[in-house]
Image: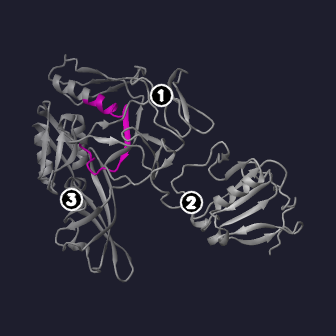
Amino acid sequence: MSLKGLRFTLDVDGQDAGTFAVVNFWLMQNNSVPFVLDVDVASDEFDREAKNLLEKNATLTIWQGPKALRYVKGVVASFGMKENNRWQMLYRFRIQPPLWRSTLRQNFRIFQQQDIRTISATLLDENGVTDWTSSFNTDHPPREFCVQYGESDLAFLSRLWAEEGIFFYDKPAPDSPDQKLTLCDDVAGLSPLKEAITFNPNTTTEVADECISTFHYEANVRPSSVMSKDYTFKTPGWEGKFNQQGENLNSQFTQYEIYDYPGRFKDEQHGQDFTRYQMDGLRNNAERASGSSNSPKLWPGSFTPLARYEKGQLHYAITDTVGRIQELMSEDGTLVWRGKQQLWGREESRNREDSPTCQLRFPGQYEDTESGLYYNRFRYYDCESGQYLCADPIGLRGGINPYSYVRNPLRWSDPLGLALLEHQPDFDAARRTGFENAGMINPEDVTFSKVDPQTGTVVEFKGPNGAKVAYDAPHADMDVIAGHDKPHVGWQSAGKRGSGGANRGNVTYDGPQHPHRSDSKGNGKC
């Protein structure tokens, strides 16, 4: 699924524009983790060297036509050469944010009487991260002391930020490639999108509009409470114990307590805050949603409500013999919806507006309530006329009417989607249907290709481009699904089956076997 007109460019400091053509890229981006962007590029420059590229600023731009939809900017952390086909060289870049540099430093030191903002500023400045900001909605008082003991700078910062309930992400500028490391302690620091993104699960064709195509929700059992305790020799009688209960437990048991000692705090406020932050961290995936989208606007730090997505409930669908849904039943067996349709799918009655709705019509069709038409993959179907409004886009079936709907489902059986099987009341009707299905409706295009060796009559006919019709007896395998258990007329439409350009099936019929076909299959040709 993709937006139309998308293209991608990679610009690296010190390199001319257009030096690298993006072949593909892979981006992994999460809250509180430095992103990783791998980009494969092609270039007609064979002499690019690592010494001229490592630690240079690089920007991947996602375009739709002339408009830039999104930028991902970072530093070149890795550069390598891949294939060379003598006219182009394939290179690979790994691009990461400036914060990534803090993974390469390790230290032992003590910070005393400093708050989290001051400690962060010191380490970020040492690692060359100058473009950053903090968006704090709660107080973060100075710590009596804290120690970086053999940790990398990023591991130390990540530990302190987690203890203080802080997460981080790279916030892009609205109209430029610039992005800023942003520290937040509340969702108020996130960036809401200007417009909601529509939920659209119908991705059977290319989707031109931004949408969320899949959405999954799950609830999990997680720790239910945290008990944190610490001690300070300055106040020996201080209890130093704090408890935090989890919220939205979804009826899970409440005995899953986490006891933490020492709690790494020396006062009331830090004790209360640290315990609450720890509880939030332990239950951060107690309720979780996941999905997929084609929108480049979605990035860690952004959020959007899902439009047109109602709270899901399980309903069982009761269908008729041709696959039309007639009733919806709830999990407890309650009837919540009932439908009544005319012959070609038009709904005759509607349910109450506050009741569940069902917009599924004939198999493969979904009703567009705005237009009243039924969407069937590549085409729209009009239930008033019983025909499509546009022709078969690939002309697979052929015939004189490319706008027609499926054949009569009361005499067409295809339970596995593999065998095309129809049934007619007699041989003459089956013969006519076979020739129509094969597209052999012009007698001048039909030639005789096989005779029955016992009756001496023609039993196989060929048309243009591989089309064929044959009168056949029951087969030894007696395959009911394929129609081999009865006398039948086999047909094949024009084209190559291996490439999906032809189709074949059988038309069975009632009554005695046609006299032009003996009980045993022959191999003779005219």
Looking at the rendering, in which quadrant would you find the N terminus?
bottom left
Please identify the residue farthest to the bottom as the structure is shown.
86
* Residue at 77% over, 61% down: 471
Front one among 106 and 119: 119
The label number, if any, that marks residue 67 in the structure image: 3
Of tags 1 and 2, the one toward the viewer is 2
Residue 321 sits above or below residue 464 on the image: above
Front one among 485 and 14: 485
Which residue is tagged 2? 400
Which residue is tagged 1? 349
344 within the magenta span: no
Magenta part of the chain? 277-301
Per the image, label 3 sits on a secondary structure element best described as strand
Q: Amino acid at mark 1?
A: Ser
Instruction: Judge whether residue 152 can be spotted in this image.
Output: no
Q: Residue 240 appears at what percent x and percent y?
A: 22, 21
Q: CA distance from mark 1 to mark 3?
A: 47 Å
For this view, does 126 lie left or right of residue 387?
left
Front one among 332 and 382: 382
Q: CA distance from mark 3 to mark 2?
A: 45 Å
Residue 224 sits above or below residue 91 on the image: above
283 within the magenta span: yes
Please identify the residue farthest to the right as the structure is shown.
454
Picture quadrant of residue 200: top left
